[in-house]
Image (tube, rainbow, N blue to C red):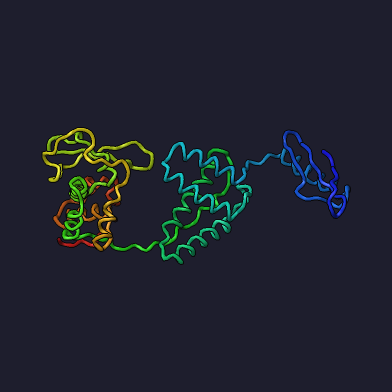
Amino acid sequence: MGQYKRKIKKGVRWYYSGQYLTTKYHSKAIYLTKGECAKAEREELKELDKEARNPSNDIKLKALMENRLDEIEARKSKDYYRENRRYFKSALAEFGDVMASEVTKSMANDLLIKEAQRLRKEKKSNFKVNSMLRSLKALFNYGNKIYDLDLKNPFNLDFYPIDINLKYIPPEGHIVAVKAECNEIQSLLIDFVDQTACRIMEACRFKYSDVDGDIITLWTRKSRNSNLTPRRIPVPNCIDGLKGKGKVFPYSVLPRYLERKITKLKLPVFSWHNLRHRRASLWANSGMSLFEISHRLGHSNLKTTQGYLQLLGFTKF
């Protein structure tokens, strides 16, 4: 410990610097006199001694975020990592690098309100607000679990309401028009997703070896970075008799040509997932049982399928 003087234009000023046990410390300001400097150092040493005698389980917010991101990077997808990093950056800019225990529910609520207001100005729904809430709630749960922080999670807050609209079901004529703009393999992928109601990445993983007579196997991940899970459904007409080796469709990432074709034709926008909704709607209209629809969609819970069908607005095609 010690006080040191420094000459500046306005005269001599004092600062302190030293080490207490294994903790280095220094003044965050300069003082007019050596006495003021010594008094400030004594106050800091009291705080360091108090912490050493009664250690509290706490961690700086930035350090907690960095450790959480390291775990996400090792265990989750790149998209999930980037999403969390973006939310952490916003929270750090709002709160500053405070101790995790200093973040209050009021501070958390103010952050979410600002995000909701920003999205409203952009005429967007609250999906990203709720996504931020989940991310930061998981951050503090991680701190409690890994570092035994024993904090009350400041993000144990209610989710924001979201406007739920009927899902758009593209009519057959629009699908035919889009396929007319596609090459053979692009058109086949549209038919495959439309006829099986599979997720687009299930189609991208699909191999010729996944065909077994009149049954095919689709592989999906129930959550990000989880193991692949198989699901067997009837073979669609579009690939009946198709033979080859390796993957049926030459895509390893989400194919974007569908959006480009729709934009070119100036049709109402629909995605790969809308084709999945379309087929579910057709199955429901044909009288297929809820259990069978749930199986074909790959839902593990019938309630998910019930909610899914309630949003479709069944239409006869």
User: Which percent across, then down, holds residue 108?
Assistant: 55, 56
Picture coordinates of residue 147 (x, y %)? Answer: 57, 38
Total residue callouts: 0
Viewer-closest of 153 and 33: 33
Q: Is residue 161 above or below residue 33?
A: below
Asked which quadrant contains residue 64, the reply is top right
- Residue pictured at 13% horizontal, 39% vertical: 242
Residue 291 visible, this angle: no
> In the displayed structure, does residue 127 sit left or right of residue 29?
left
Q: Relative to 122, does residue 219 appear above or below in the rendering?
A: above
Give residue 274's position: percent from left, percent from top: 26, 55
| Residue 302 in the image, given as x and y percentages of width and height | 27, 49
Q: Is residue 41 left or right of residue 209?
A: right
* Residue lying farthest to the left in this orientation: 241
Q: Is residue 251 visible?
A: yes
In this view, the residue in front, 266 or 71, is 266
Name the image quarter holding residue 247.
top left
Q: Is residue 306 left or right of residue 235?
A: right
Q: Which quadrant: the N terminus?
A: top right
Residue occupying image coordinates x 26% and y 37%: 230
Q: Quadrant of the C terminus?
A: bottom left
